[in-house]
Amino acid sequence: MVCNMITVIKPGATQQQIDGLLNWFHARGLKTNVSEGEFQTVIGLIGDVGRVDVDLVKGLEIVDSVKRISDPFKRANRKFHPADTIVEISENVKIGGGNFQIIAGPCSVESEEQILTIAKSVKASGAGLLRGGAFKPRTSPYAFQGLHADGIELLEKAKAQTGLPIVTEIMNTLHLEMFKNVDIIQVGARNMQNFEMLKELGKSGKPILLKRGLANTLEELLMSAEYIMAEGNENVILCERGIRTFETYTRNTLDLSSVPVLKKLTHLPIIIDPSHAIGIAEHVKPMSLAAAACGADGLIIEVHNDPKNALCDGAQSLTPEEFGDLAKRVQAVREVVQS
Ligand code: PEP
Ligand code: MN
């Protein structure tokens, strides 16, 4: 039976004692996941814990407690890893554990002038990262599909000129080589359960922005994160981008309750995408403020210098001026919430 268990180690245990216990677990065919927090070390056990005599482990001098965990997600589970995960994108750009970031930029990279103009303006108003799609998952095969490799090159150019790390979506792991200079690889809602892709991204070790699928539960989102983490990549950022409901006045329904619920279940950072959720530019700001108020670790916002003529998602794109106002107000909300 595959199930999981955690062993909480007493403060003051030596590394040698901990290593001894880890070796003892490994000898029983179990995989271990060690989380060293400020106050306690937790050893997560993955595998057939039926081979472990729980009473014997409980009785060990260095063991504080042993708990069985029934959740199907393990490495993503906060019980395995009590402290918030901080995904480090660069020396001064971090997401999670109190580090809040706004990712901003167009739905799609359209031209050099477009991406450079937007990159400079969002940077000036407080964005920490630049987004822009080069491979676009469009409902219609006749709609603009993105600039592909040229789009990624233009993002790299914008990064070189502004210093902003870049975020862009992958749709095929055969393209992974093209993403080598991309700072965060986005897995779009439509690919959340592309499990073979998730495994490959797990092997890549790159920070991954994993968007919730249009009709997926939070448990399914966490299980998709688990696919990436099971390959050894802990750099996963979850993203709520709206789910499909019976409502038609908005593009999707923004499930903000996902923030406190996910915060309880997982140590991974959670960011909100109000642009794709609500789909209407004038409503993006209030939902961004609400996301900041309920404890999200960041936002991803679509910004375009000419929304009316955007090749994709113009209706939900803010102008750089509107984005500047949003960023300022989000900052104000964060200060109130933190105080
Ligand atoms: C996007 O970010 O441009 C996008 C296509 O998002 P989603 O996968 O959430 O629809
Ligand atoms: Mn879009």
Image (tube, helix red, strand yellow):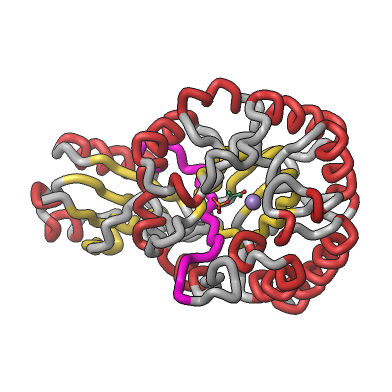
Q: Is residue 32 left or right of residue 250?
A: left
Q: Quadrant of the C terminus?
A: bottom right
Is 76 covered by the magenta stretch? no
Left or right of residue 52, residue 155 in this image: right
Tell me the quarter of the picture where residue 130 sits. Answer: top right
Residue 34 in the image: state x and y as whole percent.
38, 46
Q: Where in the figure is residue 244, as x and y percent of width and height?
A: 47, 67
The quadrant in which residue 80 appears is bottom left
- Is 112 on the left-hand or right-hand side of 84? right
Observer able to see residue 102: no
What segment is highlighted magenta in the picture?
229-246
> Is 24 rendered above or below residue 160?
below
In this view, 86 is above or below 337: above
Magenta residues, dominant SS class:
loop
Of 148 and 291, nearer the camera is: 148
Q: Residue at the location (45% across, 59% down)?
A: 214
Could you say where residue 204 lies in the image, as x and y percent from the top left? Answer: 48, 29
